[in-house]
Every structure is written in C-alpha cells, then in structure tokens.
Image (tube, helix red, strand yellow):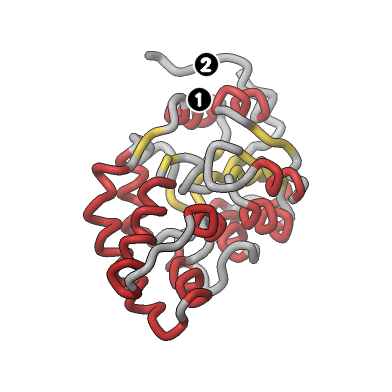
Amino acid sequence: MTSQRWPVVLFDLDGTLADTIGLIVASYNHAFRTVLGVERDEAEIRAWIGRPLLESFASVSPEHAVELDEVYRAWNLAQTESLLREYAGMRELVTDLSGAGIQVGVVTSKRRQTALMALRGVGLDGLAPLLATLEDTERHKPLPDPLLHAVAVLGVEPASCVYVGDAVVDIEAARAAGMDAIAVTWGAGLATDLDAAAPDASADSVADLRQVLGLTQSLSVS
C-alpha cells in the first residue's frame, strides 16, 4: 500500500537505481591513464557523477576531452556486465510503486545505449522506462531540462513529481524543474553535501526510501 504523496516518481540511474559507482570510477581512471598517463582521485570523480562525461573531461583537459570521452565509453561498455551491481531491494521497490499505480521513470545523463545496458543488468528494463538521456536535451543537470523533458513525455505536471537521486546536481535539477527531491546516500554523493542541498527527504537505505515514498508493505511476490 502507499499514501501516494507523489503520483510520479522519477529516478536518477547511476548510484541510485544501479550500483555503477565502481564501474564509473574505474572507467574514468582507465581513460585518464590511457590518454594522459595519470589517474584522478576517487573523491573528485565521484563529484562528477550525474553530469555529462564530456563536461567533466573538459574541466580537466579541454584539449583531450573528446579523446578521453571516447576511451571511457569503449572501456565502460566492455566492462559494464562484469562491474555492474544491483542495490538489494530496488527492483522490488520499483515493481511495488508501479503496482500501486504510481508512474515511474528514469532521467539520467548517460547515453541511451549505456543506460539501457545498466537497466537490463539490474533487472529494471521494462519496469522503469527511460524518459530522458544525454541525447534528449541540449542542457543537462543541474539545469532542469532533462526533468522537464521527462514530464512532457509523461504528460504530467512537475509539481506532481519527485526526483530521487544520489548527487547534489539531482536535487538542484529537481528544484529548478519545480518538483520535490529525495536524496539517497548510498551512491556517489556525500551525505553532508546532500543535506546542505536541502532535499525534501533523504534515505540511507532502500528500506528507508520505501517509507519516504509511502510504501508501507511489500506488494511484490517473491
């Protein structure tokens, strides 16, 4: 059962629905080693998660950004199956939201191909439709464009939605789009940074998120 505080729940993908953090950090450092012969600190890389890759690479080495992006993507695709991990209980949560009549969807800065691979890898393909990916908007989080694209696809109002994400840019994008925001602390963002961004709610576990979303019992059949 659910109180249906939000009739529409939109999810970030990396670090929220799927545990891609290790894959992303390794992919970044593979690209940096290959192109520049160096690695970057994991904390710095985690701070980039949620933004478009090319933007992050350009902040480090504008002249090599395109090459870094290409090397990253090739290695990331090759390693996705082996390094992707599920968050326990997330598949059931998404299933239960849909079963309670709540619309769900995914808004991510990933390219559609890699986003689809990640959703398949954690068993969410068909359960959480991709509403916005890198290709769908010219501007990206923390700007609201991807979220506004998603609500246009669904034909709903931003005020009826909540965006669930693990990064400060997710909270900022939700605010800019006129929707509520839930911060989850199991992904890339630091809890202190997420708290400072003042989300409407936060969750430290999938069980916590169930409660925040008003799911009072499991509707899934095991």
Q: Toward the viewer: 34 or 113?
A: 34
Q: Are marks 2 and 1 in contact (CB under 8 Å)?
A: yes
Residue 150: give x, y in percent of width and height: 55, 56
Q: Residue furthest left?
A: 78
Q: Residue at x 71, y 44 (%)?
A: 192
Residue pointed to by mark 1 = 96
- Name the secondary structure under disc 1: helix
**In x, y percent, where is residue 113?**
31, 58
Residue type at tag 2 = Ser
Residue at the spot 30% in from the left edge and 72% down from the top edge: 70
Q: Give percent across and percent down for residue 84.
A: 33, 42
Q: Is residue 160 visible?
A: no
Query: Camera-side residue: 98 or 113?
Result: 113
User: Which residue appears at 55% of the width and 39% of the height?
Assistant: 103
Q: Examine the image and state in which quarter residue 73 appears.
A: bottom left
Q: Position of residue 27 (x, y in %)?
A: 34, 58
Outermost residue to the front: 38
Alpha carbons under labels 2 and 1: distance apart: 7 Å
